[in-house]
Amino acid sequence: MASLSYDEAAHLLRRAGFGGTPDEIDDLSSRGREGAVDFLINFNQIDNTSMQNLLTASFDFSDFGNNDKFNNGEIRRWWFTRMVATKRQFEEKMTLFWHNHFATSSSKVQDVFMYNQNVLLRANVFGKFDDLLLKVSQDAAMLIWLDNITNVLGKPNENFGRELQELFSMGINDVVTGEQNYTEQDVKEVARAFTGWDYQRRVPFTFQLKANQHDNGTKTIYGQQANFSGEDVITIISARAATARYLTWKLFNFFVYPVTTSAADKSTIDKFSKVYLNNNHSIKELVRAIFTSDEFYSSRAFFSLIKQPAELVVGAVRMLGGTYNPGSTVTAGSRTSNTLAQLSRNMGQDMFAPPDVAGWDMNLAWVNTASMLERFNFANTYVTNRNTTNPGVFVTADQLRTMTKASSKKTVKKFLVRLGPLSTDALGTLRTYLETGDNGQPVTFVNDDATIDKKIRGLVHQIMCLPEFQLN
């Protein structure tokens, strides 16, 4: 069994989740590389009672017809509460991956359907890709989003058939060979296979095939002729080598490092795509292979991705051991907080509302003048909020005290490790900050309540504003 260092375990938890405390990282490290990945992937064995209790106390989603409960603020508050409170981090991180892969938006789709799709994605994060693709394709959110409810016999709507191939499975061209994966005629014929697909307009909004609107004629798809159904098309697509490569490429760009068009990177993608093909299209086995690979733990992978806003927000709360109190809509008159969702939106990631069907443009797209200012504003909001009686996000003096040491040097190192690991290049500057008074004159660092409430909060704010903290 390959060993797993502390820094490697921290890297794993940031990528397979949102980061964690030193105790959580130590626990992963003790399991070794394969054991740690197995622990995170087989998350159903992890007790998540505390999160479920919090969700029960904070949300009432029992009535699918109640638009007061299913509104965009509520479902965003619900998901951020899950991400912050879950013990099963990989479950939420993979849900985020699929949310961006099968990008639908509340700008067009009702919030109850966006919620249902999120639940569906979470329940199938590590299954067989064929099954997930079929379930998403038959779900009301996707049927509405890409207009398949208007795809009928004699008047096929090509929107879903096109994006199914371009964005959800293969890509226009094979990411390894460069060969064209489909033609415009394939798009037209695939659209015919999905005619009549719709959903019932009553709870639980299940899929239905309107037989009188389905095209039962012979279709020519990828050079094959038959009376293909939508299910047939999904089975064919899921088995193609181009799909295996495209999914591997997407997973690498999201979880490992930005992939180039070099021969070496193409070889890497091709190598891992065979795990998918040789394991009955299992996403779980593909992900396991990636997260236990030398590529994932290479120097190229460490801090090679820019944190998505959701990663930045949730990670800061989890790594620092802070608190997010979502409030409650269960108890009449109770207040709620949507701070985390709003902060993420301000940085450019509005959950349940990707900008278009292609999802968010990852990595460098997250960084610009406006978004960096919002990242700094988030750091300030997080560390300066001392109101623990109202719903919101905060870190208490007691929480900070557990990380504050007797000397400025040890204190800075403790926080750098806690919020990173980050390099110690800024150690001297941060120590000077702790040893400087309000008048600009040197002072002796004292580990007392006043220092913790002011200087330590300022220290955390400065660390969170470091360029390195923006990297994952």
Image (cartoon, rainbow, N blue to C red):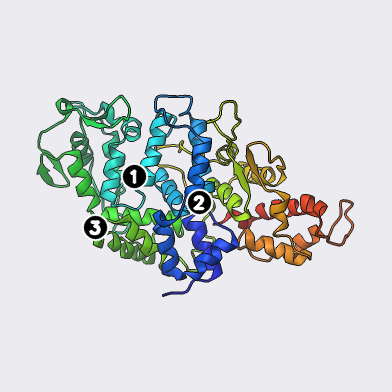
Q: Report which quarter residue 325 is drawn in.
A: top right
Can you give x and y, in whole percent of width and height, for residue 128 in the image? 28, 52
Q: Earlier in the sequence, mark 3 or mark 2?
A: 3
Q: Is residue 80 visible?
A: no
**Crowd band around label 3 with a 10 angstrom C-alpha radius: few (<14), some (14–19), many (20+):** some
Can you give x and y, in whole percent of width and height, for residue 73 in the image? 52, 32
Q: Amino acid at mark 2?
A: Asn
For label 3, the residue is: 280
Alpha carbons under labels 3 and 2: distance apart:
31 Å
Q: Quadrant of the C terminus?
A: bottom right
For label 1, the residue is: 167
83 or 467, which lies in front? 83
For label 2, the residue is: 363
| Image height of 403 relative to 454, above or below | below
Identify the residue shown where x is 60% and y is 51%. Answer: 316
Q: Amino acid at mark 3?
A: Asn
Can you give x and y, in whole percent of width and height, for residue 223 in the image? 14, 47
Marks 1 and 3: CB-CB under 8 Å? no
Question: For this view, does 470 lie left or right of residue 163?
Answer: right
| Image height of 319 relative to 123, above or below | below
Q: Earlier in the sequence, mark 1 or mark 3?
A: 1
Q: How many discs appear?
A: 3
